[in-house]
Amino acid sequence: MRDSDLIRVNDLLVTVLLHSGSRWPSKGSTPTAQPVHISLAIPHDISSAARSDDLSQSINYSTLASTLRTCLSPTVASHEEPAFESMEQILFRCFDVLLLHETTSAPRLPGAKIKIVQLKPPLHCKVLAIEGEAAFGPSASWRLTKIDHIVEDLGCNPIIGVNPAERLERQLVRINITVETLNATRALKNWLDFRALTRRLYQKVEETSYLTLEALASFVAVETLQHLQSHLDNIADYNPKIRVKAAKPCALVFADSSEVEITRYFEDYPMELTLASEASSRPDSSPSAIHCAAIALGSNVGDSIQNIELALRLLENPLLVVGDRSTISQNAFVYIVNTSFLYESAPMYVTDQPSFINCACMIETNIPPVDLLQLVKKIEEIVGRKPSFRNGPRAIDLDIVLYDELNFDTRAQEEQHTLDNLNGHLVIPHPRMSEREFVLRPLYDMIPEYVHPSLHKSISTLLNELTLISDDPHMDKVIAFPQYPLPPNNTSPLPGVDPVPSILTHWKYRDSRSIRTVPARTQGKTRLMATLNVTPDSFSDGSTHNTLPTALAYVHEAVRVSVDILDIGGYSTRPGASFVSVEEEIDRVVPFIQAMRSANLATTEDDSEENRMVRDMPISIDTFRWEVAENAIPAGANCINDVYAFTGPQNYPYPASGAAKQQMTEYMRKMKDVARKFAVPVVLMHSRGDAGMNKDYSVYDYSDDGSVLEGVRVELGMKVDEIVKGRGCIRRWNVIVDPGIGFSKTVEGNLELLRQGAAVTADRLIGSGSNEKKRNPLAGFPQLVGTSKKSFLGMILSDKRGKSTEAKDRIWATAGAVACAVQQGALVVRVHDTHEMSDVVAIADALWR
């Protein structure tokens, strides 16, 4: 189908009267006369006119131009008519003139594209423009199909750049913005207040000091979207496309400028726009208001991780914590909707004290800021914080870091010049957050693009700037395994709040997203997970360890080679495995767990160190059934390993619809409830139902990293996002991800995941096309990799060497895959042959960790 012919009129100069004014606002009610350029593009088949060379067969553009000038310019009789309220009104008047009036030289036109340029726009920008497309509709009217609002060359002078000289002096930045709206409606007569937007951007950009144009362009996009959000009454069906260009004319000697262009939508900034809309539209006093807040937590006295978990449980029960209904109203609520990773950090300010455990959470609440402060102070008291010197040791510390986009200070105005008088007061945003990596890094995990309300920099920028100049010790991430069974004296401090277990052990691992260079051999050890299948039909060791004596013998051998965790499974996931009922699976695994935890493993006279290590070894329960996990954890398990990532065996495609969606939703809800109740880590694996099926990843061929790798990031990422975000979420620091090697992947797909294992959880954009790209949902999570004895290894040996192997013959093939997983930074490798693989991991760690 060929393109339409077009009749154009370019830059028709017209004088119009605008109530919105030109460089300066109009005086009183008198509109301002000013020049505008109007450009037209009319679709019309010129074939007849071309053959006959007869203008009557075409459209007389002279008549069109004259008609528009007559209809838009003020009349001689009245210097104030016609006058227009906005640029949109001029545009609509043009469409009325062109599409609703027939002349002898211009029959009814099928449609038109019109651009109107305000040549004397408000201060600081070169021009403002509005461009629209319309078509004649079936009801003797015209229909607007698209409208663009354009700001050209808004000149601002921020601090911008990475060079030392650029940090000392402001420089010109040219900003261009286009707000594109599809499926527009004539009901909205004023989409965008140009003057208010340009004033807002000029003032806020001038206050920024970004290192990169990329960050500045994103900031401008957020501010533009927030402006639209706050100035429109109803944006439910309004999803504009925002294009932002940010250029530095002084950046390059031999070029006019350097420039970054981005395209963004409302959904690209969910947290920033949620906070902004709630802050501007809901007063604190409204009992129905839902506000978003960020709370930082820290502890370095006692069982720090237990203290933090208890504080979070109390936070979600404000009515139990604070009995005074004049402080916390009867309908008050707090929901934790996101959490960061858990970090170990060196003490700051006062360094002669133990290291801290730090994290942060995002909450939804209807409690106003000052009352929220009373709640967190009461929580500190219950958890056990004692009076201490400033910045000294503490059992728990909760700081309200952000609350919507609020700038708030309870101190008197004359006392706000110092930070030495904060005790007993609430200042939001927290005034010291920009100097604290232990606050910024957890916030980065959750809201990296959120823009600080007073510093006008994103959390990502603040963290980058701090870590570039900081020489503080590196912060390790922490994953903790709680102690089960609970001792009889482990009870909750408040009725109605589940008791919180103490910590059996914790692992530290390196945060791969740190900006500082980390020597390869300081990244921590790889953890070894031994596999105990108490089933008669496991693919690798069926009926070998499914009796209590043989299972305990395997565990003792694992202890001797310093295995870190034991994975116990009672239901084989190999293709074709026999169905096992929930009751039978429980009966298989719970007795083994109880036996390991039992004090009767040895007599009192001969309670060897090895027996103690068996009793204290962390146990992972390999199950996808919430009932099994709910029984295994109180018996002594410390972790859940779910090959279906909380979505059940019929989990592909995901997300689903109908009955399948209902089933997956129920699996996820139940498993999340169990994981939250017991505060245990979870391993979430990528799978597509039956392990031998669904191996086509061609929909992800767009990725340069490989289609299978991208498929894992997208598909497992969707599930992880649902599990760690929203009401009822589990703690981010309790999640380990497993790329699912051997499950629904070809041999080459499995190798792709091994070769590029680090890219599974890399902090980068994923998705296809600039409009669909987003941050990798798996960014920063620790990985478990399980390759032990899997069939793809046998296929490789058969293909390369003509060697047919059973599972038991793949020990050394497994060794090669395990070494690769270590080199790619896996936190945990899951193996069957602990003696041999412990040696492999030791050498691989020495080489790469």
Image (cartoon, grey):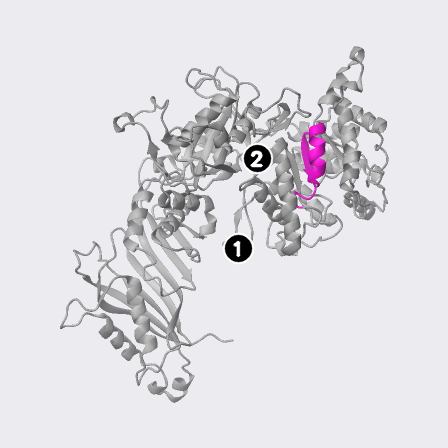
Task: Provide residue 562's location: percent of width, then percent of height.
Answer: 73, 24
Q: Quadrant of residue 377?
A: top left
Q: Which residue is mark 2?
A: 731
Q: Residue furthest left?
A: 77
Question: Which residues, given as a range, are shown in magenta?
Answer: 625-647
Q: Residue at x 71, y 47 (%)?
A: 649
Q: Residue at x 52, y 38 (%)?
A: 338
- The amino acid at mark 1 is Gly
* Quadrant into which the C terminus falls: top right
Task: Provide residue 323's location: percent of width, then percent of height.
Answer: 45, 28
Mark 1 and mark 2 in contact? Answer it, CB < 8 Å: no
The dot on residue 516 is none
Q: Quadrant of residue 289?
A: top left
Q: Which residue is mark 1?
A: 769
* SS at badge 2: loop
Within-10-Å neighbours for mark 1: few <14, some 14–19, many 20+:
few
